[in-house]
Image (cartoon, rainbow, N blue to C red):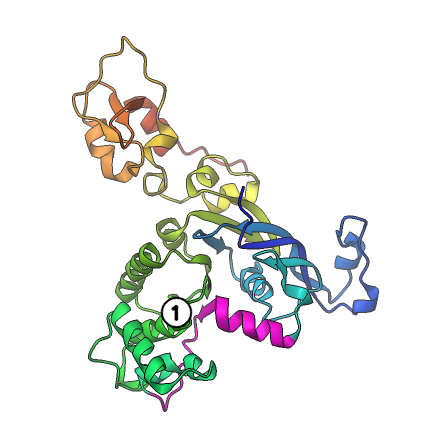
Amino acid sequence: MPEPVIRCRMLYKIFGLDPADLRTDGEGVVEPSILERDGVVAAVNNVSLEVSRGETLIVMGLSGSGKSTLVRCLSRLIESTSGSVEIEGADLLAMSDRELIDLRRSKMGMVFQNFALLPHRTALENIAFPLQMRGMTRRDYVERARKMIALVGLEGRENNFPRELSGGQQQRVGIARSLAVEPDIWFLDEPFSALDPLIRKEMQDEFLRLQSLLGKTIVFITHDFDEALKLADRIAIMFNGSIEQIGKPEDIVLNPATEYVSRFTGDVPREKVLRVGSVMESARDDERVADRAVNVADRIENVVEYVLGQRLPVPVVDDSDTVVGVLHQAHVLKIVFPARTEQPT
């Protein structure tokens, strides 16, 4: 297996603790009694995860769950209390200030909810700014910035100042600026949450388009499950600084690991999450099936009307048109629309 691009092990960020009081066991776990002290808050509590090359990992959680603190630890915008963070096998926490600056300039891009555009610079100048800091020639950084303008669809707006751009256009400038340095790793902390719903959808579509072209390794923070379902390869759900579960969206919805995850995902429309392959059953050789098949990778919401409208089970095929399973209408109804049971009081 290839080395992950990002790996953290037993990562902690504890506020209100004197470093001299930190005590861990032989494996790096902080003693529970320390975390129970008054005024001590474990914003990141024993988090271990890996992110593969080209993967989009969405980190979710309610406000105060620790997701923004986690991404700042992974990028070392804040110092972790204990644990390890590796970027392509290199120890991030052991890097000098110069090594960290070089890493951020060469490999990392960051986009946050606050666009942080320079108000007295045009869109083009904002995008070119990190390239100037690299020492590129004016000709090279202007050419690169113009390519980024085209990539995010802002041709004709390059000479506008931030105040002359809509919220969605400002966010595109922020995205273009972070991509201008051609980062391998992209950290995004609720980048679309301040946008109107329609603009937010457009930016999500733009994100998917860019990722299909660029194949970045991405850690994306959001509290919006619909956004996570649309963008994620995998989802990590945080609660009280810890990761409750990490996995593919359909695995989390079908097999919640904890009561919290079950409640967190309880109202998620399953037909939007699940793919045909996650609810299909084995096909029998003698079983009569419908004439038209569905693809194993189709989302249920795109095929459910057809499937439930058939009298016979519907065959499931892979990309080479080989039958790999079958959808029985009763099973689809049971999985996708489970009966609601009244919770005991």
| Image-quadrant location for residue 303 | top left
Residue 152 visible in the shown view: no
Residue that appears at 38% across and 75% down: 177
Q: Amino acid at mark 1?
A: Leu
Q: Out of 231 and 223, give the one closest to the viewer.
A: 231
Quadrant that contains the N terminus: top right
So how many labels did they put on this image? 1
Residue 273 counted in the magenta span: no
Q: Point out the stretch of residues depicted in magenta.
A: 97-121
125 in relation to 225, above or below: below
User: Quick one: which residue is furthest to the bottom in this view?
Assistant: 120
User: Quick one: which residue is furthest to the left in this view?
Assistant: 291
Q: In the image, is 49 to the left or to the right of 273?
A: right
Residue 109 counted in the magenta span: yes
The percent coordinates of residue 19 (x first, y second) are 79, 68
The percent coordinates of residue 136 (x first, y second) are 42, 82
Query: What SS does tag 1 mark?
Result: helix
Q: In the image, is 269 to the left or to the right of 17?
A: left
Q: Which residue is mark 1?
A: 179
The percent coordinates of residue 134 (x first, y second) are 47, 80
The percent coordinates of residue 60 (x first, y second) are 49, 54
| Image-quadrant location for residue 336 | top left
Quadrant that contains the C terminus: top right
Q: Out of 132 and 14, give the one closest to the viewer.
A: 132
Q: In the image, is 322 to the left or to the right of 71?
A: left
Residue that appears at 24% across and 74% down: 154
Q: Residues within 10 Å of mark 1 (few under 14, many from 20)?
A: many
Residue that appears at 54% across and 50% down: 4
